[in-house]
């Protein structure tokens, strides 16, 4: 269980104007196909109780949304909360990529 997961979801709910959990779930997963890739409000409740989201779901979020989308950033932060040794603090691994000097060939 993770207080950080809970805090990240609570913060995003506040930013979104505290929508219903069903509406939040729909917004968070709207980029997925309609082939059963849905997110239930019960799953969001689990996250609010500190249960980590599934890694493969969050990694899918990184492929569905552009890097400037709030859902991409939230998925990255949730991955970092779950596996900081892989993703770095709040997804710092990805941010470093953007800050590195570009190779000039």
Image (cartoon, rainbow, N blue to C red):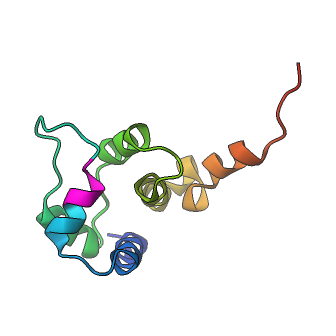
Q: Is residue 105 left or right of residue 40?
A: right
Stretch of the chain drawn in magenta: 26-30
Q: Residue at x 27, y 74 (%)?
A: 48
Q: Please state the horizontal and vertical placement of residue 22, each as a whole percent of the image.
A: 14, 67
Which quadrant is the N terminus positioned in? bottom left
Of residues 99 and 4, which is closer to you in this image? 99
Q: Residue at x 70, y 42 (%)?
A: 97
Instruction: Verify whether residue 8 appears in magenta.
Output: no
The answer to whether residue 18 is above or below residue 93 is: below
Of residues 95 and 79, which is closer to you in this image? 95
Q: Please state the horizontal and vertical placement of residue 11, each as a whole percent of the image.
A: 41, 78
Question: Principal SS element in the magenta part?
Answer: helix
Which quadrant is the C terminus positioned in? top right
Of residues 23 and 1, which is closer to you in this image? 23
Of residues 93 and 33, which is closer to you in this image? 33
Q: Please state the horizontal and vertical placement of residue 65, each as a whole percent of the image.
A: 41, 44
Q: Which residue is drawn at 27% across and 66% down?
A: 51
**In the picture, residue 88 is in which quadrant?**
bottom right
Q: Which residue is drawn at 18% across and 67% down?
A: 23
The answer to whether residue 77 is above or below residue 68 is: below
The answer to whether residue 33 is above or below residue 105 is: below
**In the picture, residue 91 is in which quadrant?**
bottom right
């Amino acid at each position: 269980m993770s207080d950080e997961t809970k805090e990240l979801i609570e913060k995003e709910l506040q930013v979104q104007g505290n929508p219903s959990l069903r509406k939040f779930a729909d917004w968070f997963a709207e980029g997925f196909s309609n082939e059963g890739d849905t997110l239930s409000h019960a799953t969001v409740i689990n996250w609010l109780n500190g249960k980590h989201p599934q890694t493969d779901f969050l990694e899918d979020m990184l492929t569905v949304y552009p890097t400037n989308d709030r859902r991409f950033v939230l998925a990255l932060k949730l991955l970092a909360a779950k596996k900081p040794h892989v993703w770095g603090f709040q997804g710092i691994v990805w941010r470093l990529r953007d800050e590195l000097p570009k190779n000039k060939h």
